Each structure stands twice: as C-alpha cells, then as structure tokens.
Image (tube, grey):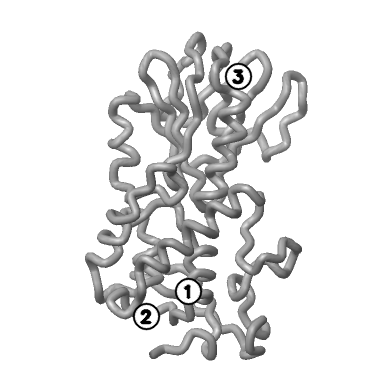
C-alpha cells in the first residue's frame, strides 16, 4: 500500500497540474457517483491527509480518494495515450484544458461537502508530513495502549497518519526493536521522530530509502529482505505475519539486531 510520502508526492503533482483549472468534463464510473457532473467547477487544491487524497473544488465540494493496494492517479496531456490500465479499471476522469486526471482502480471514491471532510478523514491521527504535526498528540495516542505491539501501534492510522509497512519495519530495525515489543517498553517519541524524519527525507528524495543508499536492492535494511543476510551482522532476516485477524501485515526483522528482550 502506498505510504504517506508516496501519496504526498502524488498530491503535489496533481495540485501543480489541476489547481486553478476549470473542470471541462468529468466522468465517474462508480455506481454511487455515476450521474455526478462536476464540469464548470474550479479545482482549488489537492492535498494529502495521511494516505488519503482530498481534491477541493469551488462550490464547497471535496472529492476524496484512497489508493489502498492498487489505486493510482495518472495525468495526461490532451491527445496523449492513457496507459494506466484497461478501460474497465478507470473509476473517474477529471478533464481540464491542459490536463486530464484519470483515477485507476480506486477502491475509495467519495464526494463530500468540504466542510464535512471529517466524515472521511476525521478518524485519522496527526499527519506525519503536516507542517502542523501534533507530536504530543501522536505520542499520547500510541502510548494509550501500552500492551500493544509497537508494530501495530505505529501502523494504526488513528494514532498517527501516513506511516506504512516500510517505515514501521525499518524504524523498528534502526531502533533495535523486536516487532512484537510492547509499547510500554519502547521509547515512543524516538520511534515517532525517526518515522517522521525518514518520511520527510524521502518526500524530497522521491524514493523510500532508510539506508542512505538510493540504489535498487540497497534501499532498506530488512524490509522485503527475508532470507537474506542482515547488512549489519550477517544474521538471516526473518519474516512473519503480525497483527489482529484480517489486519495482519508481513513484517521483517533481524533476530540479532532486534532481540526479543
């Protein structure tokens, strides 16, 4: 699933292309919005809220979308061939004079009043990439369930928004935390600060990197490196599922660098 930095970069591109432009044609291909016509409205801004995308338009409407695992937004110039997937994967088309934005495989697509955006993103904790990130609240949210694993607490978007499996896994490695370590045994501020530092750096870099080496196969310490040697100690990287039923996520760790106790 795309994480907060990936969504932030997508919103930046969409905002640069669409903000201030009038919608000349819209085509919604989901049942709940099939008859919706937003032509004539002006796109005011496109902003990220954690892993969520908010497209704010004139007339007080916001188009909310979420990538989940497979969704994406693509931008095309007039006459340019669309290549984001087959036509049946298209969920929405937003056309302006200079650009056409096409949403592919978007599992979440809602139209809400801009004054009621909390109905779709109000459950989220502080956004790690927001300039007004509320660090104290994020810490309090994570520490509110001291017996929970740090892995689950960091991934819970109600605690803090934007962090995903890559950052959760890499932060645990960098801090020497076993993935099943309880929150009460963790320096929570350090985990949150490192998560934010990595995400902000990668917003600028354009790739998810935790090692400082932006080359294929060298960007992560343990993420997606199951069965390979730890870059620090050569111990074999382990992998397992972690989380409540239906919410399990694959995790990776070095048993030597991240001991259980």
In this rendering, the label closer to the viewer, 2 or 3? 2
Relative horizontal placement of residue 135, taking residue 48 as reference (left or right): left
Closer-to-camera residue (222/67): 222
Up-down: is 45 above or below 50?
A: above
Labels 3 and 1 touching (C-beta < 8 A):
no
Q: Which residue is mark 2?
A: 181
Cα separation between marks 1 and 2: 9 Å
Q: Which residue is mark 3?
A: 95
Mark 2 element type: loop
Q: Quadrant of the C terminus?
A: bottom left
Image coords of residue 212 (percent x, y): 67, 65
Cα separation between marks 3 and 1: 43 Å
Image coords of residue 235 (percent x, y): 62, 90
Labels 1 and 2 touching (C-beta < 8 A):
yes
Quadrant for residue 100, please give it. Answer: top right
Mark 1 element type: helix
Up-down: is 31 above or below 198?
A: above
Q: Residue at x 31, y 54 (%)?
A: 158
Cα separation between marks 2 and 3: 49 Å
Closer-to-camera residue (127/121): 127
Q: Residue at x 67, y 85 (%)?
A: 229
Mark 3 element type: strand
Q: Earlier in the sequence, mark 2 or mark 3?
A: 3
Q: Earlier in the sequence, mark 3 or mark 1?
A: 3
Image coords of residue 220 (percent x, y): 63, 69
Q: Which residue is mark 1?
A: 172
């Amino acid at each position: 699933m795309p994480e907060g930095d990936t969504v932030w970069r997508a919103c930046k591109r969409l905002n640069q292309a669409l903000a201030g432009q009038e919608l000349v044609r819209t085509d919604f291909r989901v049942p709940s919005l099939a008859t919706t016509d937003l032509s004539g409205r002006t796109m005011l801004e496109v902003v990220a809220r954690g892993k969520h995308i908010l497209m704010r338009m004139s007339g007080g409407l916001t188009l909310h979308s979420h990538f989940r695992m497979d969704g994406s937004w693509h931008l095309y110039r007039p006459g340019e061939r669309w290549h984001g997937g087959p036509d049946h994967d298209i969920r929405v088309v937003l056309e302006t004079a200079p650009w056409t934005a096409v949403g592919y495989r978007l599992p979440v697509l809602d139209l809400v009043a801009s004054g009621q955006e909390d109905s779709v993103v109000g459950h989220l904790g502080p956004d790690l990439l927001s300039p007004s990130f509320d660090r104290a609240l994020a810490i309090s949210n994570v520490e509110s369930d001291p017996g929970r694993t740090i892995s689950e607490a960091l991934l819970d978007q109600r605690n803090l928004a934007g962090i995903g499996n890559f950052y959760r896994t890499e932060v645990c490695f960098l801090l020497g935390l076993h993935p099943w370590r309880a929150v009460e045994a963790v320096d929570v501020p350090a985990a949150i600060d490192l998560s934010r530092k990595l995400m902000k750096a990668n917003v600028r870099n354009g790739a998810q990197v935790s090692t400082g080496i932006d080359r294929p196969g060298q960007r992560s310490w343990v993420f997606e490196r199951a069965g390979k040697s730890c870059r620090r100690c050569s111990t074999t990287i382990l992998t397992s599922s972690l989380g409540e039923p239906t919410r399990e996520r694959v995790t990776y760790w070095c048993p030597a660098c991240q001991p259980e106790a």
